[in-house]
Amino acid sequence: MIRAPRIVIVEDEPDTLLMLRLNLDAAGFETSLAADGATAVRRITEEQPDLVLLDLMLPVMDGWAVLAELQTWSRAPSVVVVSAKNTARDRVRATQLGAAAYVAKPFDMDELLALLEEVSLDTGKVPAAPIRRPALEELPGLDGLEPA
Amino acid sequence: MGASRLARPGPIIQKMSVIEGDRPATSERIRREARVVGLRDVRAPSLESVERRRMQLWVLTTVLLVGVSAGFALLTLVPQDVQIVSPNAMRIGIVLLTVGFCGYAIEKELHLRKLSRMLVDERVLSTALSNRLHEVSLLLDAGKAINSVLELRSVLDVILRSSMDLLEGRSGSILLVEGEELVAASVRGNAMAQDVRVPIGDGIAGRVAVTRDALLINGAPSESDFPGLGTREDAVDSALSVPLLSRGELLGVLNVNANGQREFTEYELRALNLFAEQAAAAIANARLYEAERSHVAQLLELDKMKTEFVARVTHELRTPLTSIIAAAQTAQRVERFEEQPEVVEIIERQAYRLSSMVEKLLTASKLEQQESMSPLRAVDLGALVRIAARDFGIAGREVILDAPDSVEVLAEPDSLRRIVDNLVENAFKYGEPPIELRVQRRGATRVLLSVIDHGVGVPEHDRERVFDKFFRLPQGGDRPGLGLGLPIVRGLASSCRGSVWVDAAQDGGAAFHVELGIAEAEREAS
């Protein structure tokens, strides 16, 4: 039987954290949460997840330090960075520190889910219940909400 | 004091032109005299050749006189019958010849004397001229040196070194004006003068600073001549002290001292005074350059802070936007989630957060443009802080309140509430609980509002800058926030005619204070 991919969501903004958990749970991921870098490293060590969704601006230990820490590991999970910092320099730095992908905030939930599925496929795990992604035209009143 | 001689400088240009003007005429006269006395080397006669010529002349004269005397003696010995010419005629002839030659010798001697006097004068003048040329070239070199550097400290060092080289001084110093004092800015050869501060009017330099006249002092200066004279480790027998004036403004005083055999002359005083004019211009330039450089550094710093501010604002605005968009997209899958009411709450909460940020940005921009706020009126600060403390308590942020029941200050109610909110939020964000909110009367007319935390506090050198727009303390790091809270507090406080500052709480935390006027007192005053 195929195991659901495990993901640690690292995000210090509680509302965003909650939304990510709801959607990722529904998409068939096995989620656990961390609101700061130090907790994130502990959870990743304990749970050996397949994926990490990582914010950069975090209290106690920031996302850069988490990336640097994971880089020293022999078997580290794939990391998808989600950040409101969105300069070319940040993207390059994240890639250099081993991030698999970089998503700028505010993100489109469907695009993020698609990306996570793609990355988790690379790890050999697929979500247990891929969600149905509604086409844009199915959604009422969404004009203007689509991120540029 | 008899040994001291004070002199003031006058123009030195005149003397130099005298030397230059006389020189060609002198040379022409010397050549003429040399021709008259029959020197071989007419073009460049020397004192030695004149002496040789004089020797020749007198040896010749002596030989002639001895010859004539011998001729007379021989003439008496020769028998009468052998004589061809009459002896008397011979004698008259010899005497005439002798007198003629002596006349010639005396005339040559007079010319020779005149020539040797002229040659001595010429030698003295050319020595003086070469000395002057040496000094001028030293002055020129010094001028070039002080203009080749721009950093003030180096300029001062070059000035002092050049002036000591110029005058062969043993020690020297440059004192610069700082308020009512002269402060040693560059010192050589007298360790005791390092970091010395002299009130203007005291000692030699202090006197020069007041009178703005250069001073030459020969002999050890005494306390009775110069009240407030400083002590020094070595004796000074001769001293020069000149003012450094640039466009009529006194920048400082330049001192050069000598001891032992050396005694400065009035001429050297003038030379140093002339040099001081150049030096003062170089100091003024260096100061201008340093002011400009620090201005550029400030602008670069401001530019950097602005860039960081824009990045921060962008980040801060994106954070609630991310929650709102994520929540909105989640809400569309409403059939899947039981948490729908919570999702809608998130949208509302984050939208408010976004709106409060926009409000803050607008307030800061409004304060910047100094748009007029609503008119001031009496506001009960006691009641206002009680309500604020209650609101913070409801939000789970306990604030310790210490305020009188009622105290009316002259303010704008919304601004005052925002001042309190910003300071308390700031304390929770950067300080450590417990957070105290105090209101105290200060005398009969003022009221002090204080917000005190127990964190690490604000370093003393940043206490003014924390109220600057875009400024963030290094320990603020990546903590969320626009960094506009304190600038807004200052802007709002000043629009309420109040003042704001930060100092250290008793345990080292930060204590932010806002001082406002009591409503009644303000009304009476206006």
Image: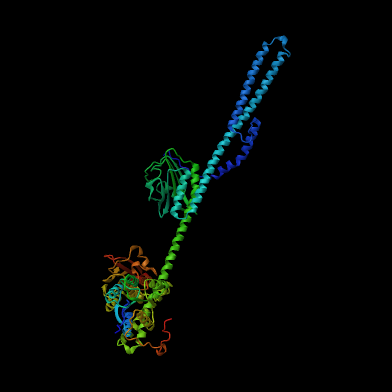
Residue B248 can be seen in this image: no
Q: Nearer the viewer, residue B321 or B499?
A: B321
Q: Going 64% across and 19% down the picture, which residue do you hit?
A: B65
In-front residue for pair B151/B454: B151
Q: Is residue A98 above or below residue B216?
A: below
Measured as percent of width and height from the top left, residue A64 is found at: 35, 71
Q: Position of residue B390 (x, y in %)?
A: 27, 77
Which residue is rendered at x = 63% and y = 30% of the image? Answer: B111
Q: Residue furthest right?
A: B84
Q: Position of residue B126 (x, y in %)?
A: 56, 39
Q: Quadrant of the N terminus of chain A?
A: bottom left
- Figure label count: 0
Q: Position of residue B252 (x, y in %)?
A: 44, 51
Figure check: A98 above or below B233: below
In the picture as drawn, the residue positioned furthest to the front comes out as A1
Q: How is the image coloured?
A: rainbow
Q: Quadrant of residue B296?
A: bottom left
Above or below for B114 versus B211: above
Q: Is residue B496 left or right of residue B293?
A: left
Horizontally, is B116 left or right of A103 in the view?
Answer: right
Viewer-proximal residue among B160 and B410: B160
Residue B365 visible in rendering: yes
User: Going by the image, does B268 lie left or right of A128?
Assistant: right
Quadrant occupied by the C terminus of chain A: bottom left
